[in-house]
Image (spheres, rainbow, N blue to C red):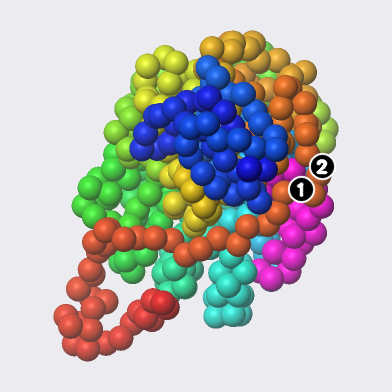
Amino acid sequence: MFDLVIKGGTIVTAADTYRADIGITGGSIAALGTGLEGNDSIDATGKLVLPGGIEAHCHIAQESATGGMTADDYRSGSISAAFGGNSCFVPFAAQHRGMGVTETLDLYDSRAEGASVIDYGYHLIVADPTEKVLTEELPAAFARGVTSFKVFMTYDLMKIDDRQFLDILTVAKENGALTMVHAENSGMIAWISDRLVKAGHTQPRYHAPSHPALAESEAINRAISLAKLVDAALLIVHVSTPEGAALVQGARLAGNKIFGETCAQYLFLTRDDLDRPGMEGAKFMCSPPLRDVATQEALWRHLQAGTFSVFSSDHAPYRFDDSGKLAKGPDASFKQIANGMPGIGLRLPLLFSEGVNAGRITLQQFAALSASNAAKLYGLTKKGSIAIGMDADIAIWDPEETRKVTVEDQHDNMDYTPFDGWTVKGWPVTVMTRGQRIVEGGELKAEPGYGQYVARERIDLTGIPGHRAVELDPDTNFGARIMPETKA
Ligand code: DUC
Ligand code: ZN
Ligand code: ZN
């Protein structure tokens, strides 16, 4: 007898689709078979049984460098994620200048513990790579299971320079961590933004021309070059242009340790959404900005072709009031408005509806993009698949259930959704983490605090040849040892 059996469903993994029951004991998948019996059961007849989603790019209980706080904390953020088909999420823990890394992680522990309904980890944002951070605190962060570090190439209070970037890539490589980068050219953005504002073009729509596609492609090219120099693993987050995607694809084809992510808003929205009356466009401001329909089509093709390992929401919730988007007043210029939009509860329904049900991607691609790839990339070794011994992190989907998106139906702390009025077909009806129902029948079934911190493993780069810079190799640089050895 198992603790729980999911009966009669069609199991979908990144590899296969097949009919089987799932026996769950002690929070883990204990058996796959037919005729399994348990103390408790769920009838999944006619449903798809998928790995619970892993939302690997979201901003929860995070202050910006200028002090603004996201609207969602670990309670509301995790609940919203769970209602959207996720069993686990990995928000950011943001170091700001003057803060230590250990202090930052302790702070986020205090925010997440006792609050999250699903399992969680953090990516660390590194904004102040002091000697102590590089030599002591990043290795210590890695040892506590924070195995990915994000850096910014733009934003005056967050950005690092190329030399600091190389330092972080090198420490990450030495420890087996993955560096993530927000790649946009800071100078191009500042130059255009100042001219736009001086000319009186301050409305939200001017956010789009202030962040040109070239700012992204220049920075992605530079970021990839820096990572290649030291042969380190690098993930370009929120890729928003065909040019940027092609750079990621080219680097991957050439055998470099480069990965890419795109986000829901770049597939489903365009910069026309920024051009709404009054300040409405502020609801659609994110960075990089929304582009155009041709870009959407190109990004779909890259998603289909495997350029992007991860597909995320980049949930960055700022309410449409003076606590968020309008904190600098009702007539603030686009430069003063917080960047980001909500979407943690809709990432997977949108991808299922517009991806699987619209015939753009297979169920296997959906499983990979919703959970399995993030689990592999970010070292969540017990999550992201349906197999014996894995955590019973499972989302049961009704592929036929059709919903109209409304603000009221969201479970986040937001007062708008950019997807208001959209119709989606396919819905996660039951979501569990380690065998515990988190959401069932439209209701929350778990208490805040059920979710546990997950210490993540080092990145697995098996099979990727990487890049050899002759100038850094003692065999070809007259014997100089520049790079530290990678720790086992
Ligand atoms: N980068 C993110 O990853 N999210 C929100 C805004 C930003 O600049
Ligand atoms: Zn970013
Ligand atoms: Zn983000």
Q: Residue at x 75, y 60 (%)?
A: 109
Q: Residues within 10 Å of mark 2 (few under 14, many from 20)?
A: some
Q: Residue at x 77, y 18 (%)?
A: 408
Choose top left, top right, bottom left or bottom right for residue 302.
top left
Label 1, on which residue? 450
Q: Which mark is residue 447?
A: 2
**Quadrant including the N terminus:** top right
Q: Residue at x 47, y 45 (%)?
A: 387
Relative horizontal placement of residue 174, taking residue 445 as reference (left or right): left
Q: Which range is magenta?
A: 101-119
Pick the residue in front: 24 or 119: 24
Could you tell me which secondary element the residue under label 1 belongs to?
A: loop
Amino acid type of disc 1?
A: Tyr
Instruction: Residue 83: give x, y in percent of width and height.
Output: 68, 29
Magenta segment includes 116: yes
Which residue extends farthest bottom? 479
**Quadrant including the C terminus:** bottom left
